[in-house]
Amino acid sequence: CVPRASRPALLLHDHHLARWLPPAHRRWYATGRAGASGSFAVPHPTRADTLRYPARAAGAAAALDPKLKGAMVGRPDPLASRGEGGSGGGRATAFDRLVYYPILFLAAVELLVWYSVAATAPPSEQQTVENWSATKQVPCERYVQPETIAAVKDAVEWAHVHRKRLRPVGSALSPNGAAFNEDGMLSMALLDQVVEVDEENMTVTTQAGARVAEVTEALRSKGLTLINYASIREQQIGGFTQVGAHGTGATVPPLDETVTKLKLITPAKGEITLSLSDPDGGEALRVARCGVGALGVAAEVTMRVTKAHRLLEKTWTASRAEVRKKHKQWLAGHQHIRYMWIPHTDCVVVVGSNPLPEGAEPPVVAEDTPERARKKTEPMRRLLQQCAPEVDSADMGFGQLRDELLKVAPLDLEHVKRVNAAEAEFWRRNSGRRCDWSDKILGFDCGGQQHVYEVAFRTGDSVETNTGADLEYMAELLEMIETEGIPAPAPIEQRWSAGSASPMSPATNVACDGSKAVGAGAPGLHSWIGIIMYLPSDDAKERDAITAAFKKYADRETNTLGEKYGIRTHWAKIELPDDPDARADARRAVETRYDLSGFRELRASYDPKGVLGNDMIEGLVGDPKRVERRDAFSRAFWGPLELYAEEQAVAEEEKAKASDEKNDADPAPRRSFHRRLERKFNRAVEDGSFVNVCVQVAMAVALHFTLAYRNVRRALEAEDARRAEAKKEAARHADERLRETPPASPA
């Protein structure tokens, strides 16, 4: 857009940049002086002709002050030597044709590919997705929300054809962000219909996006309910079953075991329906119903249900010794039972429930008046008054009080001990019983924002044959916490379930070699243990410190007890380590504790390109090369950019501190720009398209030169500013000399 006559002036300021350009481009850049470029270029002007413009520009100023000429034209034009004496021209060299023409061709092909992808892409939007505990957040470039099964099929087919990741996501409740993917996510939230309630066969068929609470209400009108419930009623049925969610009850299996039919939308096979009556004996269904969303998008799920019933729940506290003494009796005597161990105390909260006998009237339970509720929380209020007297606790409940107490010093061991002791006293005062429908008894409040790590392991073939590994594990875990001084808040929750026939369930009854891990006809007995750390503060540094402490806490548990007890981490709570060695160890642990043969065989058939996966899936059970390749290319091409962004961020922070105010030039947009380019490049590498990879490599190199160009421009701008200042200084001196020189006398 620069007029031809003005180009020499532009070149005068940008002559340093010309040194970065190949010869043919330098000639092209000098078009303002040559008059033409390309194959029909006119002879290049001589050096004297080249300097005509700067000479004219400096002529008038030189009359005022000779020093000003040197300030304006202090250096010779480096472009003038090209084609000196009228030789040369704008023709491209053989090297130019060899290097630049193929890049232009590949760019044109990339443009066509981009147009093809964009023209057929499903409707989507950019959206930042966050899980319920605010521990994971991902900026998703393509967030698709289909409203029909046909739209789901179209979106999955598009992803398969163009090798674009499109990870299915439910309510985004998983603490580890199991469904998160930066490239693309497929939300099932709008497919939330209860399709059919079969009262004769005691089953319910729902779309995958239906929430547990909605399904429960639809079943209630028919006198039915789900066999078991996890803690959160906002889960969608698809994610509820795909990650192997569970409730508690030594004879009650995880929720995936109740699935009898599954409609799956797969990338390679399209829509398929799997059931227990299939010719393979239902083996494909057993693998896919707990497939972590990696085999296909669950569109419709059919589950077994049971008659609606009330549960009579009793809550009491016990010492650790009493638990060891009465554990088998309590485990066998309650349909649903869980322990809440309070670290650094000798208090265990026991919550057990049994169905109310049919026809029996619910017992009368005294209502919890405000006065009684306040008396229960008095120990916690008293401690809060001592630690943070400025906090008004008048209207706070148990959960709020715990958050406020931990906010004072969440990683201070002695403070956490005092908080746990106050919580133990609360539960002693809160002992009692209540009666309600099963869904309302089994669902409970999980507390505020938190980190959770939960594992499962086999502890016998049945309740009667319990090996005692469940309590041994807890004893060793508590000893580790108290010996090493870990500031572990309460509770450490322990639950039980029967086994599952799904090979990918953490409570699977299938051994890693495909054989049955339990005795013939035995249901299996598995214990689930979850540790926790809360995030009571919004301060980023404090949250980061808690996160680091929790990772260390979870790693210590895994390294100390994992191999001995053969633990399997809950799919919604497992993490893919950043360190390559730790990642290899995590993958090895998964491979030695699950039978992955059926899963990998189905995935090779249903999703051979891995478009429904993410780094967690590929790193633990899929193709690790997809993750390693992305990491390798990221380090090679984007490492310098990340370093540059970090340096800029540090510089901006130091500048803001020096001026004692926030700098307007926030480095975040620059980093975000680099992140977007990095994700695009990584997708091209993962796709395996040679054209895409070549074009993205060219983009990376171009971006490096763009940064160099920006640095050169900044240097030139600084030089221009210096020259302008010199010009002003020279003009000021000239004015002073004129004022000081006496006027000449008349002749």
Image (cartoon, rainbow, N blue to C red):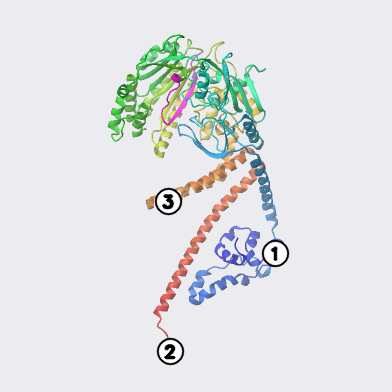
- In the image, is residue 458 part of the stretch drawn in magenta? yes
Q: Are marks 1 and 3 in contact (CB under 8 Å)?
A: no
In terms of secondary structure, where does tag 3 sit? loop
Query: What residue appears at the point 50 percent right and 61 percent down from the top-left corner?
Result: 717
In terms of secondary structure, where does tag 1 sit? loop
Query: What residue appears at the point 39 percent right and 21 percent down from the top-left corner?
Result: 341
Q: Amino acid at mark 3?
A: Asn
Which of marks 2 and 3 precedes in the sequence? 3
Which of marks 1 and 2 precedes in the sequence? 1
Q: Nearer the viewer, residue 571 or 91?
A: 571
Residue depth check, mark 1 versus mark 3: number of the one nearer the observer = 3
Q: CA distance from mark 3 to mark 2?
A: 61 Å
Q: Are marks 2 and 1 in contact (CB under 8 Å)?
A: no
Is the residue 40 above or below the residue 689 in the image? Answer: below
- In the image, is residue 12 part of the stretch drawn in magenta? no
Q: Which residues are magenta?
A: 440-460
Is the residue 409 above or below the residue 60 in the image? Answer: above
Please identify the quadrant where the N terminus is shown: bottom right
**Is any atom of residue 226 visible in this view?**
no
Is the residue 646 above or below the residue 177 in the image? Answer: below
Which percent across, then down, holds residue 315? Answer: 38, 17
- Residue labelled with disc 3: 663
- Residue labelled with disc 1: 41
Which percent across, then down, holds residue 544? Answer: 42, 37
**Is any atom of residue 1 visible in this view?**
yes
- Residue labelled with disc 2: 746
Which percent across, then down, holds residue 143? Answer: 56, 37
Which percent across, then down, holds residue 508? Answer: 54, 19
